[in-house]
């Protein structure tokens, strides 16, 4: 029986009410050792990967299947879909002749083991932990977002070679770079599947219209029309951003660490973004706090900001003091002595963005892997020639830059604070020598 037929029978028997789409059946029936799936957002790829992993582990004795994503949290999300499929199948009473079968399994937050010794394990993007396994099938979900492709590739070769293991890469495009792009555009020996949002009818016309409203045309091209965007136009190419990305959850830094806040008040989508940075012992700046406030009234925003200030005790709170920011900055000034209002003219914005670019280029910033909106906005940020022959840095037409500007403000606060301290030290030294 074809795997897609079996999967559909199981879905029907469990009453899931899901009819597999044509692309899902083709993917499930494709037994190639190497597969790549290029997809629009939300088409049901993770759902299908999880379904295939569960069906495969039921059919094969002693199989090890690894599910890998770009962060711990993202791998857990994917594994949650595995758990959903398992609990759906656990409700089934399967019978062959006079024998009744039930799905016997032991499931934790990151792994499932079945009575036939097959297992499914979720892992973050960490080549060292991959090397510890011998796998029959490894899935990389959102492969375009992976850092350190080269060591991942060599770890995967090590993990799969002994068992002739299969490899499946699934992703929305993320620039003309990286392993997923190379596989899709150049490498032979891969079975390639392309899944457009029109192939997934659960995405309704209404949802598409909503998405069109919030995405810029570049985002739409990338996320929905599956275009690999050229990196030349990007002020922050993915390669540079991903060098700063680490798999961690932002949290309050150790006592004694110097911290900084940057706040951009909502112009787009009524959202205000707060970014906290902490200075590491090696001098790097780490994002230790990131929060977007959507459609919150003035008093609510002031309260959240005051709470964050109490939590992090920042040395500087750099806020955008233009337009909507003026009244909030004035209100905060009464309670927040370390407030640094910045009037963001286009030349100040350019110099803040340039400082951020230098920091990213030198790898002096740590960005959490799950900060997807920030990463997306950074990448879409552009260097643009003005009519007067100058250069401007900005989000593309209709785009958002609230995460970028909030981060740029925090960096601006950190760099100004450092400069002022150095000036103070040299003043003291000068004073001592005089
Ligand atoms: N055949 C189907 N019929 C109806 N709904 C489906 C079908 N297959 C998947 N879905 C639903 O599609 C939704 C999106 O699924 P999923 O998160 O797996 O997509 P994705 O492509 O991985 O999305 P993302 O781009 O956000 O990672 C889920 O709610 C899932 O249940
Ligand atoms: Mg997914």
Image: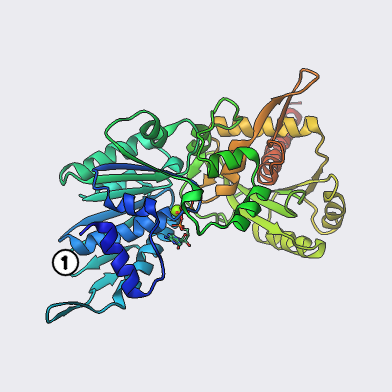
Residue in the image at 65% along x and 31% along y: 382
- Using the image, determine if residue 111 lies above or below residue 268: below
Q: Quadrant of residue 280?
A: top right
Q: Position of residue 159 (x, y in %)?
A: 23, 45
Picture quarter with the N terminus: bottom left
- Using the image, determine if residue 358 lies above or below residue 206: above
Badge 1 crowding class, 10 Å Cα cut-off, few under 14, some 14 to 19, many 20 or more, is: some
Direction from residue 95 to residue 421 in the image, left or right = right
**Residue sticking out furthest to the top:** 389
Res. 331 in view: yes
Direction from residue 38 to residue 294 in the image, left or right = right
Q: Quadrant of residue 152?
A: top left
Residue in the image at 39% along x and 71% along y: 16
Q: Position of residue 5 (x, y in %)?
A: 27, 61
**Residue sticking out furthest to the left:** 98
Res. 108 in view: no
Q: Secondary structure at mark 1?
A: loop
Whether disc 1's CB lies below 8 Å from ligand 1 is answered no
- Using the image, determine if residue 139 lies above or below residue 78: above
Q: Position of residue 200 (x, y in %)?
A: 47, 54
Q: Which is nearer the eye, 349 or 26?
A: 26
Q: Which is nearer the eye, 185 or 122?
A: 185
Residue in the image at 35% along x and 67% along y: 85
| Colour scheme of the picture | rainbow
Direction from residue 99 to residue 262 in the image, left or right = right
Picture quarter with the C terminus: top right
Q: Which residue is mark 1?
A: 116
Q: Which is nearer the eye, 347 or 54?
A: 54
Q: Position of residue 346 (x, y in %)?
A: 79, 32
Residue in the image at 79% along x and 63% along y: 297
């Amino acid at each position: 029986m074809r795997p897609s037929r079996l999967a559909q029978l199981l879905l029907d028997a469990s009453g899931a009410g899901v009819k597999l789409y044509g692309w899902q059946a083709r993917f499930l029936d494709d037994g190639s050792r190497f597969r790549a799936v290029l997809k629009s957002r939300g088409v049901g790829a993770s759902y299908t990967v999880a379904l295939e992993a569960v069906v495969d582990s039921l059919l094969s004795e002693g199989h090890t299947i690894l599910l890998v994503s770009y962060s711990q949290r993202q791998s857990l999300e994917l594994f949650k879909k595995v758990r959903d499929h398992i609990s759906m199948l656990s409700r089934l009473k399967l019978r062959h002749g006079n024998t009744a079968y039930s799905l016997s399994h032991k499931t934790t937050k990151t792994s499932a083991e079945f009575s036939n010794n097959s297992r499914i394990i979720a892992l973050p993007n960490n080549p060292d932990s991959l090397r510890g396994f011998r796998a029959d099938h490894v899935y990389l979900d959102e492969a375009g977002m992976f850092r350190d492709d080269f060591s991942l590739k060599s770890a995967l070769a090590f993990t799969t070679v002994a068992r002739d293991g299969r490899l499946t890469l699934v992703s929305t495009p993320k620039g003309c770079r990286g392993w997923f792009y190379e596989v899709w555009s150049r490498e032979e020996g891969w079975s390639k599947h392309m899944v457009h949002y029109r192939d997934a009818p659960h995405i309704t016309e209404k949802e598409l219209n909503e998405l069109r409203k919030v995405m810029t045309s570049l985002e739409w091209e990338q996320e929905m029309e599956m275009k690999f965007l050229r990196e030349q136009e990007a002020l922050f190419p993915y390669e540079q951003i991903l060098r700063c990305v680490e798999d961690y959850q932002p949290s309050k830094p150790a006592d004694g660490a110097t911290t900084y806040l940057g706040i951009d008040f909502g112009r787009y989508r009524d959202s205000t973004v707060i970014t906290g940075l902490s200075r590491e012992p090696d001098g790097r700046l780490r994002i230790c706090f990131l929060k977007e406030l959507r459609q919150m009234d003035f008093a609510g925003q002031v309260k959240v900001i005051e709470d964050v200030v109490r939590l992090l005790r920042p040395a500087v709170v750099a806020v955008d003091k233009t337009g909507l920011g003026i009244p909030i900055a004035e209100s905060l000034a009464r309670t927040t002595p370390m407030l640094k209002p910045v009037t963001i003219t286009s030349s100040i914005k350019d110099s803040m963005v340039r400082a951020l670019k230098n920091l990213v280029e030198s790898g002096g910033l740590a960005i959490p892997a799950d900060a997807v909106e920030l990463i997306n906005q950074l990448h879409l940020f552009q260097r643009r020639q003005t009519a007067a022959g100058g250069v401007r840095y900005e989000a593309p037409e209709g785009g958002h830059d609230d995460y970028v500007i909030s981060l740029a403000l925090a960096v601006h606060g950190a760099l100004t604070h450092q400069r002022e301290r150095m000036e103070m030290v040299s003043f003291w030294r000068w004073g001592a020598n005089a």
